[in-house]
């Protein structure tokens, strides 16, 4: 049975092309398969004229056959598609026409350049030809003159001898047709007249019919060879190439020299073509302004001059400096090299790298109104975060450990009237002074929150000082007005002591009575903020490079270094390259206060920035620069300057000061600790709080602090220093926990700064020496002194006051002067050893390792009590 089984093979209609394909299988099996190929349908585009005529017909005819139209396409849609197609064809025709015009212009320019080059070449050839003809004419005249002199000399000689053979008659001048050959042979046969003179003389002296001598035959042979060389040279064209057919005899008897290869001829043709196209001209050397620091590496100098490093090294070696391209040279030497290469040296210092930061003043027409930045400040637990939650309709307080704010937070709120306000929430605890100072420096308006039931407190006074130092206006928000016993008048009166006069007392500082719990007065507070912002006329340019302030920074496990930035001017976009403090980076992502990823952040917008090279310090300024090289250079310069500053501070200490400090430290006990926190601001606050713990006898020494999880490096440092590790809102990873367990390093976790400071105080208090207090318990007078064998000198005493105890300490007084202090070796009543003897009784006492006792001495009996001290 055949493969087709008598059936017609399947096809796609039309006129297919059929054939057979042989398939091979395993074990030598084969199979023939009938296949057919459908030719590809070729769509011929409609001419623009035909399309226009079809479009002009209107009606259903211009839209084509509805039966061939794709399903679901209406007439209007079809009309739009056809219109778009016609517009595209029209644009394509315009582009083709424009390209054709540009091609014609380029061709005309090339032709004009070729014509100019050919004209120059023709002029050069004409000048060369005129010069050649002039030289030939001078040579012909010189030869004619020489021949005339020779002929005259020969005639005179013949007249003298009286014989002039017929064969030696002067030859007639050559015809004009032979002159070109003589002209071409002139340079080669310049010595021919002299030889000819000798030959002619011989010929004239020889008899008629005589055979020419050997020297004459040799001269004739040389003349023939020179003539042959001259004819071979004339067979070449102007460019030195052979003209005509190359025969065997011409190849053997011709030039006999080396001919140019085919590759050389191709190179020559290519040079001529490039010269005709105008590509052969070397570009003029570009003079550059080379920025020259105090020291520069040779390779970097070559890059800035756009010269080869090998040429720069060669120039330095000529000056006597044997350096390589990776070595640094001083500015004076580099300036000589720059001048030698024809460039201009521009001296710069390391601090000039900061000039890459844009400091251009914005024009007034580019400035636009921006939202105000409002910082909420006040004493701890006066309701700052609760007030902000009421405005934002959020609940941040529940997420804070201990119900107190320990981080600085940035939020943007939309007011009921549609305007935007950026809020900064600062901690109120005493340890977060630097955070409050940063908030006051970047803000436009400060809201001073004072609890109506608590009035002005220490951190309230500190917030007032920060606001005055930053010279920003203040709005007083009297909170907790819903509580029983709230007294707003007392708050206003207390503020008078700090030169804060509110409007209710005829001052210029706005005050609003609010309640975060009930929402009372929130609208009036927002209106006061809007009014103050309108008075300040806050404006910024959103179309310039961004400038911002780092509010907070942290090291996230999954995202790396993260900085909370408040944009102050310009617009920060994803992909921008920036430098912040000693760090730099490229914006990888921007996250707003709601946790949403955004592409850009304008003025007064707080965002989290990802993509930093390291964790910056809170309070650093963020500046956007143009290139990564600039950002890296600025960051390296700042890091180097900070190191130099720290080194200079250490180098300024003299040896005497070091010795004095070491001597003073001998009596001071230290408690070393390592601090790791979740954010940079918290770490700084903890370090500042711990530095205040201690007195003249004991102090806390922070060996290291940073942000992020506790690592093996921290554990190793803590083990070497015998210090505990303090983790604030961070944890140790598994490897660090195992390492700490093996090495016996203590790791303590905290989430509230109160507990952390209290525990450190308690630990530092344990290093304090206990206070020893003495309590006098009695006096005894020596009546008699005895010497007892095996005991020594024993004093017979009468207890005159108090009680004498065996375990107590004693002092021996002689004429009211202490001559010995020690302990009792024995205390006896009669012959019995007793623990104590009361007043009015007699007893025997012996001192430990002291026997110089006399009658009439007084024994003072006391007890010592050690009292453990604590740090205040």
Image (spheres, rainbow, N blue to C red):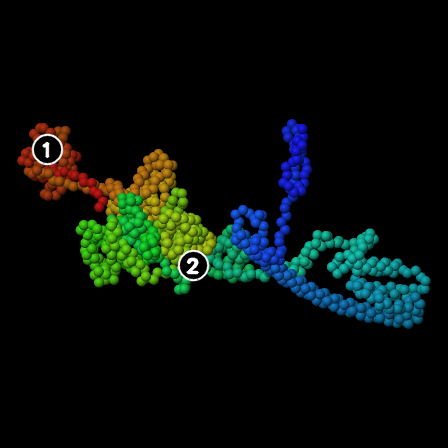
Image spot of residue 543 (x, y percent): 43, 59
Q: Quadrant of residue 153?
A: bottom right
Q: CA distance from mark 1 to mark 2?
A: 93 Å
Image point (40%, 43%), residue name: 558
Circle 1 SS class: strand
Task: Write down the quadrant of residue 676 in the picture.
Answer: top left
Q: Nearer the viewer, residue 587 or 37?
A: 37
Q: Which residue is mark 2?
A: 543
Observer-side mark, 1 or 2, equals: 2
Q: Vertical placement of 780 versus 172: above or below? A: above
Judged from this view, the residue extending furthest toward the left is 840
In depth, the one of 744 and 541 nearer the eye is 541
- In-front residue for pair 111/757: 111
Write down the residue under mark 1.
Answer: 836
Where is residue 727, by image quadrant?
Answer: top left
Q: Position of residue 815 (x, y in %)?
A: 10, 43
Q: Residues within 10 Å of mark 1 (few under 14, many from 20)?
A: some
Which label is found at residue 774?
A: none
Query: What residue do we see at 30% from left, 44% from top?
Result: 399
Residue drawn 76% across the image and 59% down it: 237
Quadrant holding the N terminus: top right
Q: Is residue 315 left or right of residue 198?
A: left
- Residue 757, compared with residue 545, is above or below; it is above
**Is residue 92 in sight in this rendering?**
no
Of the two numbered discs 1 and 2 on the same chain, state the one appearing first in sequence.
2
311 relative position to 769: left or right: right
Q: Is residue 594 left or right of residue 331?
A: left
**Extreme top residue here?**
27
**Whole-percent x and y of residue 351?**
42, 57
- Label 2 sits on a secondary structure element that is loop
Q: Residue at x 16, y 39 (%)?
A: 865
């Amino acid at each position: 049975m055949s493969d087709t089984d008598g059936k017609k093979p399947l096809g796609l209609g039309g006129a297919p092309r059929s054939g057979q394909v042989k398939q091979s299988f395993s074990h030598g099996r084969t199979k023939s398969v009938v296949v057919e190929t459908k030719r590809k349908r070729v769509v011929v585009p409609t001419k623009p004229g035909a399309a226009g005529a079809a479009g002009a017909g209107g009606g259903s005819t211009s839209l084509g056959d509805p039966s061939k139209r794709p399903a679901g396409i209406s007439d209007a849609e079809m009309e739009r598609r056809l219109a778009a197609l016609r517009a595209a064809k029209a644009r394509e025709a315009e582009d083709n026409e424009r390209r054709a015009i540009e091609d014609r212009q380029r061709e005309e320019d090339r032709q004009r350049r070729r014509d100019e080059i050919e004209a120059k070449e023709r002029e050069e050839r004409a000048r060369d030809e005129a010069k050649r003809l002039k030289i030939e004419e001078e040579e012909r005249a010189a030869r004619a003159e020489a021949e005339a002199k020779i002929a005259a000399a020969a005639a005179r000689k013949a007249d003298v001898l009286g014989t002039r053979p017929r064969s030696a008659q002067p030859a007639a001048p050559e015809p004009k047709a032979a002159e070109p050959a003589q002209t071409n042979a002139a340079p080669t046969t310049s010595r021919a007249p002299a030889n000819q003179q000798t030959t002619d003389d011989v010929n004239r002296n020889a008899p008629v019919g005589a055979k020419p001598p050997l020297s004459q035959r040799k001269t004739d042979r040389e003349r023939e060879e020179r003539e042959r060389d001259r004819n071979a040279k004339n067979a070449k064209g102007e460019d030195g190439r052979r003209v005509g057919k190359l025969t065997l005899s011409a190849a053997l008897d011709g030039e006999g020299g080396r001919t140019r290869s085919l590759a050389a001829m191709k190179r020559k043709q290519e040079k001529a073509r490039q010269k005709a196209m105008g590509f052969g001209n070397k570009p003029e050397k570009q003079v550059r302004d080379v920025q020259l620091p105090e020291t520069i590496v040779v390779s970097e100098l070559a890059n800035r001059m756009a010269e080869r490093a090998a040429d720069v090294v060669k120039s330095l070696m000529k000056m006597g400096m044997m350096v390589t391209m990776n070595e640094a040279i001083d500015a004076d030497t580099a300036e000589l090299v720059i001048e030698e290469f024809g460039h201009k040296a521009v001296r710069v210092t390391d601090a000039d790298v900061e000039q890459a930061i844009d400091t251009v003043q914005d024009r007034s027409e580019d400035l636009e109104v921006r939202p105000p930045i409002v910082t909420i400040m006040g004493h701890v637990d006066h309701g700052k975060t609760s007030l902000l939650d009421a405005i934002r309709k959020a609940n941040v307080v529940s997420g804070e450990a201990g119900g107190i704010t320990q981080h600085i937070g940035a939020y943007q709120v939309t007011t009921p009237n549609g305007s935007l306000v950026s809020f900064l929430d600062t901690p109120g605890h005493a340890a977060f002074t630097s955070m409050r100072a940063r908030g006051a420096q970047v803000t436009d308006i400060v809201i001073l929150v004072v609890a109506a039931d608590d009035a002005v407190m220490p951190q309230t006074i500190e917030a007032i000082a920060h606001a005055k130092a930053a010279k920003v206006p203040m709005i007083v928000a009297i909170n907790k007005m819903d509580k029983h016993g709230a007294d707003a008048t007392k708050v206003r009166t207390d503020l008078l002591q700090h030169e804060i006069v509110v409007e209710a007392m005829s001052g210029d500082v706005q005050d609003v009575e609010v309640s975060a719990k009930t929402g009372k007065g929130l609208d009036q507070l927002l209106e006061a903020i809007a009014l103050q912002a309108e008075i300040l006329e806050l404006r910024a340019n959103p179309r310039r490079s961004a400038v911002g302030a780092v509010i907070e920074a942290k090291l996230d496990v999954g995202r790396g270094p993260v900085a909370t930035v408040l944009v102050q001017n310009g617009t920060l976009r994803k992909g921008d390259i920036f430098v912040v403090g000693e760090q730099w980076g490229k914006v990888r992502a921007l996250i707003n206060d709601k946790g949403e990823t955004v592409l850009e952040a304008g003025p007064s917008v707080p965002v989290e920035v990802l993509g930093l090279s390291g964790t910056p310090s809170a309070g650093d300024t963020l500046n956007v620069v143009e290139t990564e090289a600039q950002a890296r250079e600025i960051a390296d310069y700042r890091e180097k300057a900070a190191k130099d500053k720290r080194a200079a501070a250490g180098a300024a200490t003299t040896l005497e000061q070091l010795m004095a400090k070491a001597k003073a430290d001998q009596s001071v006990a230290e408690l070393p600790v390592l601090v790791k926190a979740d954010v940079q601001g918290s770490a700084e606050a903890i370090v500042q709080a711990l530095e205040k713990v201690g007195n003249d006898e004991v102090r806390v020494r922070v060996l290291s602090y940073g942000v992020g999880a506790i690592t093996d490096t921290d554990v190793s440092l803590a083990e070497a220093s015998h210090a505990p590790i303090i983790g604030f809102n961070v944890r140790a990873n598994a490897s660090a926990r195992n390492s700490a367990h093996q090495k016996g390093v203590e790791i303590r976790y905290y989430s509230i700064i109160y507990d952390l400071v209290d525990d450190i105080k308690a630990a530092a208090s344990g290093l304090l020496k206990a206070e020893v207090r003495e309590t006098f318990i009695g006096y005894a007078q020596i009546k008699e002194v005895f010497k007892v064998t095996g005991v020594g000198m024993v004093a017979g005493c009468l207890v005159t006051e108090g009680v004498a105890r065996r375990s107590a300490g004693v002092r021996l007084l002689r004429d009211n002067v202490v001559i010995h202090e020690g302990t009792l070796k024995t205390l006896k009543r009669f012959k019995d050893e007793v623990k104590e003897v009361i007043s009015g009784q007699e007893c025997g006492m012996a001192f430990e390792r002291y026997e110089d006792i006399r009658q009439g001495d007084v024994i003072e009996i006391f007890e010592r009590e050690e009292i453990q001290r604590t740090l205040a």
